Image (cartoon, rainbow, N blue to C red):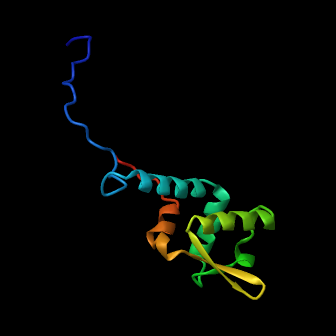
Amino acid sequence: MSKYPEAQPPLTAVVPCCPPITGGELSAHEAERMAATFEVLANPVRLRLLAKVASHPAGEACVCDIQDVGVTGATVSYHLKKLRDAGLLVSERRGTWVFYRVAPSFGAAGPAACAPRAATSST
């Protein structure tokens, strides 16, 4: 038995650890659009607001139902506007209240992609 470890053959193929996130390469326009969306979603308050709207039993939420995220009302309005401007939420004013829904263009998988996942073991 040698005191040196046995030499391993060189790797000849690259095996991806994860499935691709897209069906193919992204155009510059698609990459910019996705990056802008990710930038909006990179804020934890916005993620919480989006999750509150997406998980609301009525399928939509009044701002009064989702404002308890630890910031001022003005800051909640600012973040909701960012989500709306990014096309992730749509809003409708009813009297003095504004109701928010997940934008149809964001798709059903959008909010699910933001949901925390349990850690899985690969062993």
Q: Where residue 54 sits in the image (x, y, percent)?
A: 57, 73
Q: Is residue 115 above or below residue 92?
A: above
Q: Residue at x 26, y 11 (%)?
A: 3
- How many numbered discs, if any? 0
Return the residue nearer the eye: 26 or 2: 26
Say left or right for 19 vs 72: left
Is 115 left, or right, of 60 in this rendering?
left
Q: Nearer the viewer, residue 85 or 101?
A: 85
Q: Position of residue 81 (x, y in %)?
A: 67, 67
Residue that appears at 35% across and 48% down = 122
Q: The N terminus appears in which quarter of the rendering?
A: top left
**Left or right: residue 48 compared with residue 3:** right
Residue located 42% across and 56% down the image = 30
Residue 19 x %, y %: 32, 52
- Residue 87, percent across and down? 55, 68
Query: Which residue is found at the position 57% from the left and 53% from the top?
Result: 39
Give the quarter of the image for residue 61.
bottom right
Quarter-wise, where is residue 48 in the image?
Answer: bottom right
